[in-house]
């Protein structure tokens, strides 16, 4: 009989190519992983045999990820650029996947029609759509596709023992392993072992004539008969898995993953974290969830028993943290390293043949006959329409999910950034991106400049990163304390990493950058703000690198592509014959084991219906829950929570709807009141938690205390709000709060300011800046410096003045020494100082010595978010001496000082006061720097507080400040001996620049306070301006 | 190797002591130097010729600050051997030791001196720093000039270097002799702030123009004054403090942007602050009027450097009293109208505090800002269930007490 081309497969391929081929252009660049692969591809395109990449972290080896897909993209990029390479590989992946599913289904069902249906369904299966269009896991897709291609060959080898099948199988396994290392390893367990089980079943069946007659004993004897082939295949593939990516294994052994696991949504409890449940369970399974009983029934048929066990295991493992079973099965370590979504992916792929079989039976087989006979044709059509509708709906929903819930920031035009890095030798320093999402990889692929960050977290090397569950510094705000904590260390001591430029796409980080001493350089034409830090040395010409032997480099560069070529040559013939039908290909053995599609098991019909109904019920219940959660005005508590939720998301119209309608506050008025508040709380905070307590509750009235915690880039803010609530017509409302009616004195006024500009380099040259264009470093003077100990934490405090005639940016670095002059720790001044000083301006400072948080992985990481979390450095000895290095650089920005302290009131434990902004810039975040002095007017401590609200132009802002507890403060060493300014001894500078310093000024400048531990304070102000004009 | 070097050194020494026309006779070898010149100018074509007999392949070993090398003859004419010095050696000044080697032994040695090519065009390498200095008689920028010949050899010591300095309308000229490969001079500051431009010239070659900024020196004490629209403590208007033109000891106006701190001592001994930076020596800082009568003592500082006189300002009360009305069963308390110094309603935003007491105990402080001169407080029954309350109302420095109001 002449075999005809399978129409379903052809249709599937055509639709697949059109559908995915066009969709991929709109989706893949926004996926999580695709751009990372692109970055790796760029690496291979430029240095095929050199595994060391300097661009990310402080250099890392690309031997940490199998290279085939990257190399393929890199190779194709030489024709039409990187993105061309990626799209081409993605389209190849689509073809491989559809044909792979077809071959796998044919193997399982032995029915060309069922397999054709499976191939069609594979095109639209939500799990594939998600993996390709949402996750962008190209290597994983190619890996599993090739694995599916290899399954029939493995079957035939074990069944027939003909070596050509073994070669084919092994060649395909080799391609799989070089594209994705996890796939063949787990594929061995979950796909190949069950397949071997199936072969043994088939083999046994041939002995006894029926599956029913197979007993365990027969199974075992068959197993031993086939044992040699199994071993030959197993040994061969083991060798291939080890050999083909040998450099990878050596690298993993050399650099074991010792880092703290990064939380992954697939390990969440899907019932608690519903978003993870959606992405990692509901979408991959999709409509298959309705058919689970059928799928399990079929896979628990005797022939497929091993597949049944495998799919059960995969299903259970895929549930992540919902049940404790996956954790128990995998163990703590594996559970925390593996991303469990792949199990669901494999389970759903494994279901596809059965799904195809079901579709075939439903559309034109026995199931259709049964339903039509029993319930009539109409029910069959309705059911069919429902299933097809649901299936397509799921696909459309999946592919568009990133449109409705963007998982990445808007696409950023990289060219201005690339140009910026290329000009003026900006690439001589490292850079960092903030708020770029996975697009940072695309930037890295396009520029030769290096970043401290990276997007392949297994390759992280700096302890600042590996000890924390931070995927990237880039998105550190989503990782709470650990993220911001890591980021802060990079921002405070950037010279350690030669980090000079930051590209910020998220203004959330702006205050953090400002208070760490960074300054805005310019806004690029794509809207990205460039921040810069002064006094950072450029990268050295030669950077450290971990070299590997040449044979490993050669293996890494040659083997992957070689496996493809070999696989192509070995399998070419078959593919050629099969597609073009030139020569009759012998009928593969597995087609002998046809299923009986004439008699649908009626017992299954009802349970599956019930199950589907149950699933529908669950869906409706979920929708209902969603609705109930949103009835916000049912109780007083709800309305307060809803109000703050609305404020948090800046949905002011919704917030306004919760206000008492009789209070006569129009939305316009409300918006006006909202728009005039600025500051860290209204512009840079995210609501972390809210706890509402109702007081004096009567039937229609209540007083509510809302205890809120807000996360800001600088600190965690706890704020308590009071509200009066009223109930009207069954709904609770908030009484609007009073707002400040203060009006500024002047409608129009003028102000004069000295502004500065520094040309940088005056000559157009590609060389280093001419020495005559380099400005002299402004001269600073350290007025006092002390080593103090507070609560067994050591700090350096003191005062510093810019004694030059130009404004200065100040970098302060302190080092602690013990009695034997051994260095114990060093750190830079972070928030506790004014980093920008006008001529003759004084700032107090405090330098705390921060260690790398949770260096010791045994200490538990606190679960609550606190960006201000401080990990004191662990000192080996008691510090007794210190060295203080200050460096000035001419500053031209962030010099706004026109904020006055217009009223102050002292209390026993606190002070209250008013700030007044008399200039023409709105201060977004004012910072109070408070220095404490003893009765002899000697400095004993420095502290600071960020005010929650900004100070608008010509307006007041009230503040309250609680005294620090200074009982344990002890001044250990007060000396200016080892203080240096721009590398010169402070003493000589002090003598030269201000020889007759008037010490009395300092004495007259202090505010007397009646407090226990101190007698005087000094208040200084530091203003962060969010939107300078 | 060491021995060999020592040998060369000794031979070199010996060679330089002996006359150059040295004839050595060793067994059957004979060598004689024919070149008579021992001093060359850099860049000159230097050839050393010898008359050598008995050696087939003599070699010339050269040792120089640039390095060492071994030469074959470049030309041979019977027993006359001519060695051509490579350019890199002949371009570089300094002593050059040569050693003529036979097959196994040295034959002759000697030294030649290469001097800078003063006849070629002089080139200048010039540095000036620091680029900004302070007015007066102490600070200076240092100019370092390193003139070289066209082969980058420093010119000989005591070469004359001319240094020019332009300051205001004066151009001065200095002559400095080179010493140890360079010439330098401290360009002293001037008592008047400004720009000092400096250049240098050697053998007709001029340097670029260099600039040193002379900034004003430290400020001296100054005076402050105030300006305000009216003298009332309305908590709304601004008082502006200005300094006189602040100058240094040389009468220079101090650098723009210099920070001046204005410190205000209140009657309650509180320290208020406002800041300003100078423009043309004058700093102008503003301060909000207090909202209750006050006397301020104001003094300005440039910390550690200079200070001002102290001035005293008094702010008058804008009102003596205000009406307070209880209505709606004492549950609504209306304060105002608050009228200002010429019976006008005070500008919106005046702070009014209501302190609520029950049986002598403060239970709550309510705070509101005025609108159209009035503030209304509502005491809802739900929140204030007690039978009696007494109150204090505070506004603009006036406190009014109300005893025991009864509630249902």
Image: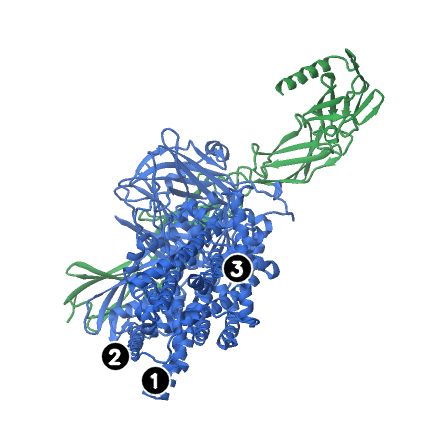
Chain colours: A blue, B green
CB-based contact (under 8 Å), mark 1 and mark 3 = no
Marks 2 & 1 on one chain: yes
Is A188 left, or right, of A571 in this rendering?
A: left
Q: Is residue A955 above or below residue A771?
A: below
* Mark with earlier residue (1, 3): 1
Q: Quadrant of residue A774?
A: top right
Q: Which residue is mark 2?
A: A729
Kindly give the residue lying farthest to the right in the view shown.
B78
Front-most of residues A941 and A262: A262
Which quadrant would residue A616 be assigned to in this image? bottom left
Locate residue B395, reporting x and y percent: 29, 61
Find residue B226 and report its horizontal and vertical position in percent: 44, 51
- Label 2 to label 1: alpha-carbon separation: 53 Å
Residue in the foreground of this view, choosing between A245 and A743 = A245
The mark lying in front, picked from 2 and 1, is 1
Whether residue A634 sits left or right of residue A277 in the image: it is: left
Residue A653 visible in this rendered orientation of the protein: no
Q: What label does residue A371 carry, if any?
A: 1
The answer to whether residue A575 is left or right of residue A377 is right
Chain-order first, disc 2 or disc 1: 1
Task: Give the Cα distance between marks 1 and 3.
Answer: 46 Å
Chain bearing tag 1 is: A
**Dot 1, crowdedness within 10 Å: few (<14), some or many (≥20)?**
some
Q: Which of the 4 image quarters holds residue B390?
A: bottom left
Between B146 and A546, the one nearer to me in the picture: A546
Q: Tell me the CA gap for discs 2 and 3.
A: 75 Å
Is residue A35 visible from the viewing direction of this image?
Answer: yes
* The label number, if any, that marks residue A567 in the structure image: 3
Among numbered discs 2 and 3, the one appearing first in the sequence: 3
């Amino acid at each position: 009989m002449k075999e005809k081309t399978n129409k379903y497969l052809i249709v599937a391929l055509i639709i697949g190519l059109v559908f995915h081929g066009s969709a991929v252009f709109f989706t893949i660049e926004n996926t999580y992983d695709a751009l990372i692969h692109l970055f790796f591809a760029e690496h291979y395109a430029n240095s095929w045999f050199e595994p060391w990449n300097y661009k990310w972290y402080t250099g890392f080896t690309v031997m940490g990820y199998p290279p085939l897909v990257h190399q393929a993209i890199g190779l194709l990029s030489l024709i039409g650029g990187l993105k061309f390479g990626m799209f081409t590989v993605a389209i190849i992946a689509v073809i491989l996947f559809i044909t792979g599913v077809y071959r796998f289904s044919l193997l399982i069902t032995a029915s060309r029609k069922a397999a054709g249906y499976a191939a069609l369904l594979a095109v639209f299966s939500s799990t594939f759509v998600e993996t390709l269009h949402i996750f962008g896991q190209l290597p994983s897709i190619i890996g599993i596709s090739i694995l599916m291609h290899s399954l029939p060959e493995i079957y035939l080898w074990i069944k027939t023992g003909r070596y050509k099948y073994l070669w084919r199988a092994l060649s395909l396994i080799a391609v799989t392993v070089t594209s994705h290392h996890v796939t063949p390893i787990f594929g061995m367990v979950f796909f190949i072992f069950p397949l071997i089980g199936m072969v043994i079943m088939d083999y046994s069946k041939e002995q006894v004539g029926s599956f029913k007659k197979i007993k365990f004993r027969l199974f075992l004897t068959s197993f031993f008969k086939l044992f040699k082939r199994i071993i030959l295949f197993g040994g061969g593939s083991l060798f291939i898995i080890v050999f083909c990516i040998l450099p990878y294994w050596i690298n993993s052994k050399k650099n074991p993953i010792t880092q703290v696991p990064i939380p992954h949504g697939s390990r969440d409890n899907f019932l608690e974290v519903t978003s993870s449940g959606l992405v990692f369970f509901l979408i991959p399974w999709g409509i298959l969830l309705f058919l689970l009983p059928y799928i399990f029934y079929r896979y628990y048929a005797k022939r497929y028993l091993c597949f049944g066990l495998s799919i059960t295991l995969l299903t259970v493992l895929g549930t992540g943290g919902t049940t404790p079973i996956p954790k128990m099965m995998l163990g703590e370590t594996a559970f925390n390293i593996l991303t469990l979504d792949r199990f669901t992916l494999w389970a759903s792929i494994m279901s596809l043949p059965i799904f195809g079989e079901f579709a075939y039976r439903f559309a034109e087989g026995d199931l259709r006959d049964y339903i039509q006979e029993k319930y009539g044709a109409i029910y069959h059509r309705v059911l069919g329409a429902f299933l097809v509708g649901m299936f397509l709906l799921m696909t459309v929903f999946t592919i568009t999910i990133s449109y409705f819930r963007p998982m990445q920031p808007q696409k950023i035009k990289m060219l201005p950034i690339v140009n910026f890095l290329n000009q003026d030798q900006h690439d001589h320093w490292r850079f960092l991106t903030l708020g770029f999402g996975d697009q940072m990889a695309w930037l890295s692929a396009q520029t030769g400049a290096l970043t401290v960050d990276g997007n392949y977290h297994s390759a992280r090397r700096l302890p600042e990163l590996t000890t924390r569950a931070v995927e990237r510094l880039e998105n550190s705000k989503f990782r709470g304390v650990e993220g911001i904590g890591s980021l802060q260390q990079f921002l405070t001591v950037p010279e350690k990493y030669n980090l000079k430029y930051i590209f910020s796409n998220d203004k959330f980080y702006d205050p953090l950058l400002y208070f760490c001493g960074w300054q805005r350089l310019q806004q690029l034409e794509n809207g990205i703000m460039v921040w810069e830090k002064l006094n950072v040395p450029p990268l050295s010409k030669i950077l450290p690198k971990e070299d590997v032997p040449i044979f490993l480099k050669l293996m890494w560069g040659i083997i992957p592509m070689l496996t493809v070529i070999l696989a192509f040559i070995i399998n070419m013939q078959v593919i050629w014959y099969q597609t073009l039908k030139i020569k009759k290909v012998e009928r593969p053995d597995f087609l002998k084991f046809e299923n009986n599609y004439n008699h649908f098991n009626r017992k299954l019909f009802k349970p599956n219906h019930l199950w589907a109904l149950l699933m529908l019920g669950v869906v409706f219940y979920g929708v209902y829950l969603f609705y109930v959660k949103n009835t916000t005005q049912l109780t007083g508590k709800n309305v307060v929570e809803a109000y703050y939720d609305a404020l948090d998301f800046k949905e002011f119209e919704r917030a306004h709807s919760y206000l008492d309608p009789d209070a006569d506050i129009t939305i316009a008025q409300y918006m006006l009141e909202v728009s005039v508040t600025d500051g860290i709380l209204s512009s840079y905070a995210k609501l972390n938690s809210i706890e509402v307590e109702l007081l004096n509750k009567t039937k229609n009235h209540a007083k509510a205390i809302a205890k809120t915690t807000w996360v800001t880039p600088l600190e965690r803010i706890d704020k308590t709000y009071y509200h009066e609530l009223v109930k009207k017509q069954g709904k609770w409302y908030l009484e609007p709060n009073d707002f400040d009616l203060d009006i500024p004195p002047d409608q129009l006024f003028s102000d004069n300011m000295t502004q500065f500009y520094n040309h940088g380099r005056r000559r157009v040259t590609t060389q280093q800046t001419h020495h005559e264009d380099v400005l002299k470093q402004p001269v600073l003077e350290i007025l006092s410096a002390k080593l103090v100990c507070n609560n067994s934490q050591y700090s350096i405090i003191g005062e510093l003045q810019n004694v030059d005639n130009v404004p200065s940016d100040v970098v302060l670095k302190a080092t602690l020494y013990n009695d034997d002059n051994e260095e114990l720790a060093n750190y830079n001044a972070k928030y506790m100082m004014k980093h920008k000083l006008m001529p003759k301006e004084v700032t107090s400072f405090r330098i705390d010595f921060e260690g790398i948080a949770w260096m010791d992985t045994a200490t538990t990481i606190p679960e609550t978010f606190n960006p201000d979390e401080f990990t004191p450095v662990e000192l080996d000895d008691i510090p007794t001496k210190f060295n203080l290095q200050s460096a000035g650089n001419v500053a031209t920005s962030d010099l706004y000082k026109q904020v006055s302290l217009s009223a102050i009131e002292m209390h026993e434990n606190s002070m209250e006061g008013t700030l007044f902004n008399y200039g023409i810039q709105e201060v977004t975040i004012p910072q109070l720097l408070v220095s404490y002095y003893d009765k002899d007017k000697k400095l004993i401590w420095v502290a600071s507080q960020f005010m929650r609200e900004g100070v608008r132009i010509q307006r007041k802002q009230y503040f309250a400040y609680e005294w620090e507890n200074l009982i344990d403060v002890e001044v250990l060493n007060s000396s200016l001996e080892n203080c240096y300014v721009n590398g010169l001894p402070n003493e000589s500078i002090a003598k030269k620049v201000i020889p007759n310093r008037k010490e009395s000024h300092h004495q007259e400048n202090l505010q007397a306070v009646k407090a226990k531990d101190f007698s005087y304070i000094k208040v200084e102000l530091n203003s962060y301006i969010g939107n300078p004009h | 190797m060491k021995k060999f070097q020592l040998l060369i050194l000794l031979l070199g020494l010996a060679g330089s002591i002996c006359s150059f026309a040295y004839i050595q006779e060793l067994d059957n070898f004979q060598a004689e130097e024919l070149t008579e010149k021992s001093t060359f100018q850099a860049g000159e074509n230097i050839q050393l010729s010898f008359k050598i007999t008995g050696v087939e392949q003599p070699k010339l070993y050269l040792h120089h600050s640039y390095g060492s090398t071994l030469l074959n003859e470049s030309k041979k004419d019977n027993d006359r051997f001519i060695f051509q010095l490579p350019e890199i050696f002949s371009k570089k000044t300094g002593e050059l030791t040569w050693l003529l080697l036979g097959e196994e032994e040295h034959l002759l040695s000697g030294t030649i001196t290469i001097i800078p090519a003063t006849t070629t065009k002089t080139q200048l390498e010039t540095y000036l720093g620091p680029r900004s200095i302070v007015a007066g008689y102490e600070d200076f920028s240092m100019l370092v000039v390193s003139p070289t010949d066209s082969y980058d050899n420093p010119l000989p010591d005591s070469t004359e270097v001319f240094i020019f300095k332009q300051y205001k309308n004066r151009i001065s000229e200095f002559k400095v002799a080179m010493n140890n490969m360079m010439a330098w001079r401290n360009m002293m500051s001037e008592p008047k702030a400004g720009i000092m431009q400096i250049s240098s010239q050697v053998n007709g070659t001029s340097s670029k123009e260099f600039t040193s900024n002379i900034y004003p020196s430290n400020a001296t004490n100054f005076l402050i004054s105030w300006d305000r629209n009216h003298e009332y403590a309305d908590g709304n208007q601004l008082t502006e403090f200005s300094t006189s033109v602040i100058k240094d000891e040389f009468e220079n106006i101090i650098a723009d942007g210099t920070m001046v701190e204005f410190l205000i001592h209140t009657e309650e001994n509180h320290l208020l602050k406002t800041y300003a930076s100078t423009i043309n020596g004058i700093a102008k800082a503003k301060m909000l009027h207090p909202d209750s009568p006050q006397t301020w003592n104001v003094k300005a500082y440039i910390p550690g450097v200079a200070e001002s006189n102290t001035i005293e300002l008094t702010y008058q009360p804008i009102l003596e009293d205000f009406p307070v009305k209880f209505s709606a069963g004492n549950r609504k308390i209306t304060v105002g109208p608050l009228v200002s110094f010429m019976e006008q309603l005070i500008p919106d935003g005046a702070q009014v505090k209501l302190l609520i007491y029950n049986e002598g105990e403060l239970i709550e402080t309510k705070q509101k800002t005025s609108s159209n001169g009035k503030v209304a407080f509502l005491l809802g029954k739900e929140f204030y269930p007690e039978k009696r309350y007494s109150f204090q109302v505070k506004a603009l420095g006036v406190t009014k007490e109300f005893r025991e109001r009864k509630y249902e």
